[in-house]
Amino acid sequence: MSTQNIYDDPKFFEGYSRLPRSESGLSAVYEWPAFQRLLPASLRGARVLDLGCGFGYVAREARARGARHVIGVDLSERMLAAARAVTHDDGIEYVHAALEDYAPEAGAFDLVVSSLALHYIADYPALVRKVAACLVDGGRFAFSVEHPIFTAHGSADWYYGAQGDRLHWPVDRYRDEGERRTNWFVDGVVKYHRTIESYVTGLLQAGLCLVRLEEPEAEAAQLAEHPEWRDERRRPPFLLMAAMKAMPA
Amino acid sequence: MSTQNIYDDPKFFEGYSRLPRSESGLSAVYEWPAFQRLLPASLRGARVLDLGCGFGYVAREARARGARHVIGVDLSERMLAAARAVTHDDGIEYVHAALEDYAPEAGAFDLVVSSLALHYIADYPALVRKVAACLVDGGRFAFSVEHPIFTAHGSADWYYGAQGDRLHWPVDRYRDEGERRTNWFVDGVVKYHRTIESYVTGLLQAGLCLVRLEEPEAEAAQLAEHPEWRDERRRPPFLLMAAMKAMPA
């Protein structure tokens, strides 16, 4: 299978780069308050792997919180170039690779994070097995994806009434896992829909133990700045999970 | 809060009693193949608690598989009377109680099951804490509920096109947990919608470890008999989970 690299499409990159989360970083990210709850209490001394690091915001945040070393992996050369341009830190290493091809060292990381990247990956169970193998015992995997409720139907949009009002969110084809082509800055962006069952089962079958699952809504402070995020309560845009290698004591 | 006992409403009971799952038992139950996957490999010698046992099908099945003792708890006197009428087994005890009021002995059960009952319970976290307390270490809790995708909107029905065709399943009010009143044999049946996050978090916060999550579709053999179940693939009707007290070794 060929690996989609939509982020290096000039038109896509231009659009994506103008998103608040691209321009302003984590403070403008809807799910960042929830994502932080997935992380261990302290990152001091941690070796961190960021799968789909994009502009490197999480990598730099991890270093700011005391991580010893961070490797950020991304398929997009444009995003990595932008990340490198604003990173002045020997503790961060950016690696240009498809997540499917990247081969991390076994037992080399205390924390693996991935923000909104795994719904681009066709073989999620294989990726999770790789994550589990590269974690130390007691290490943690924390990730976000587009929610299966969001991706199932394929339109990636509300169902509208005659007056253009948002009637509800349509769900269909829930058990039909696989490609969903949407138009997002450019035509035919390929994402993969899978069920919550598959997201959870992939973790458990890789020997990980689920420690948290969130379907976050925006917090009050965020809504003050982004009132349009209120509708996200009506159906969850993102699914976040944290899992540990071996059981916490 | 008052406990709803819709199953003893004569009109509801009459309608419910004519469902295939009521008349024909587990072989006619859509989610039974998946539910069995939640159970331990062997029930031999197990002490089992069935919360919302209804007509007692699961209780009798557990005994047939070698369970030592089964307690079935239900709020409906009519269902318990029907269960008792077909049960000739000193190893099964039926208890008439609301699940919220029933106080099981601590550490008394190897397995707690609950089939499509917990979406009638307002305080799910409290119920799960009670389940966790009555399990032995290594014991298991296996349950099914109406899926949050199914319950969120509140109509409990497809969204239809002009020709009466099923366009899709509507999702709305996902983060608005609480009562949903539907018409099911009678008007105003109260069920509780909660998020998948809440279903999972309740288990984890009670000290249980998630071992399985399923959003089952019908199997081929079932579809041969019930072709109308094909549409259930389009959105999951049920959510099934199994959790253990303490980590499997």
Image (cartoon, coloured by chain):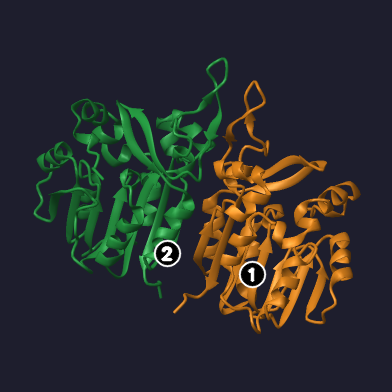
Chain colours: A green, B orange
Vertical relation: B80 (above or below) A217? below
Category of crowding for the residue at label 1, using alpha-carbon neighbours closer than 10 angstroms: few (below 14), some (14–19), many (at least 20): many
| Helix, strand or loop under label 1 | helix
The percent coordinates of residue A53 (x first, y second) are 23, 46
In the rendered image, residue B76, in percent from the top left (x then y), is placed at 84, 60
Q: Residue at x 29, y 30 (%)?
A: A19
Does B138 appear above or below B78?
below
Residue at the farthest front position: B224
Number of the label disc, if any, that sits on residue B10: none
Q: Nearer the viewer, mark 1 or mark 2?
A: 2
Amino acid bearing label 2: Leu
Distance between the alpha carbons at the discs numbered 1 and 2: 22 Å
Along the horizontal axis of the image, is A163 left or right of A190? right
Q: Quadrant where the N terminus of chain A lies? A: top left
Secondary element at image label 2: helix
Residue A162 visible in rendering: yes
* Residue that badge 1 annotates: B131
- Mark 1 and mark 2 on one chain: no
Residue B89 horizontal/vertical position (percent): 82, 79
When asked about the image quadrant of residue A86, the answer is top left
Circle 2 residue:
A204
- Circle 1 marks a residue in which chain? B
- Screen quadrant of the C terminus of chain A: bottom left
